[in-house]
Amino acid sequence: VQLQASGGGLVQAGGSLRLSCVASGSTFSAYGMAWYRHVPGKQRELVADINTGGRTTYADAVKGRFTISRDNAKNTVYLQMNSLKPEDTAVYYCYTRGSIFEPWAQRDYWGQGTLVTVSS
């Protein structure tokens, strides 16, 4: 599985960005997907995930501000980020373990990361 993330950039505090991640493969609907973020010197943090049924979970730090969604027809997962804060500055990565119907092929798959910078 190959993941291609995009949408990062520089935004002022209070602004919005939408990240996108396109996945390869013909069974995207069977992939659980997630967004992580990493700040140098800190551990990578799970931001949000969405399962194959569309159920979502969020880190407490982003609840009410971020929304994860998926478009299976486009093999794409999104992260809509609103009311951004300087502490949201990080490299954001999309992640999957692949198809739930192919357990023999499951492993950690990461996108290349996209930088989000929020200025105060």
Image: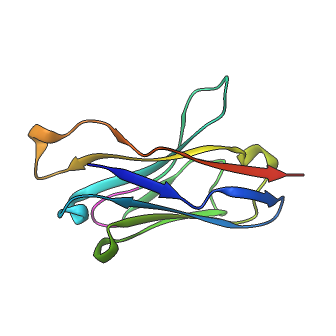
**Relative to 59, 76 lies left or right:** left
Where residue 78 appears, as percent x and y from the top left, is 48, 65
At x 25%, y 62%, the residue is: 28
Pick whichever, 88 or 92, lies toward us: 92
Looking at the image, residue 16 lies above or below residue 90: below
Tell me which residue sits at (70%, 66%) in the image.
82
Residue placed most toward the observer, 60 or 106? 106
Residue in the picture at 64% in, 26% down: 42
Image side of residue 118 versus residue 66, left or right = right
> Would residue 23 appear left or right of 6 to someone viewing this image?
left
Instruction: State the extent of the magenta-drawn residues as a range.
Output: 50-54
The residue at 48%/55% (across/down) is 5
Q: Position of residue 54 (x, y in %)?
A: 35, 67
Is 89 left, or right, of 113 in this rendering? Answer: right
Image spot of residue 52 (x, y percent): 27, 62
* Residue 46 included in the magenta stretch of the image: no
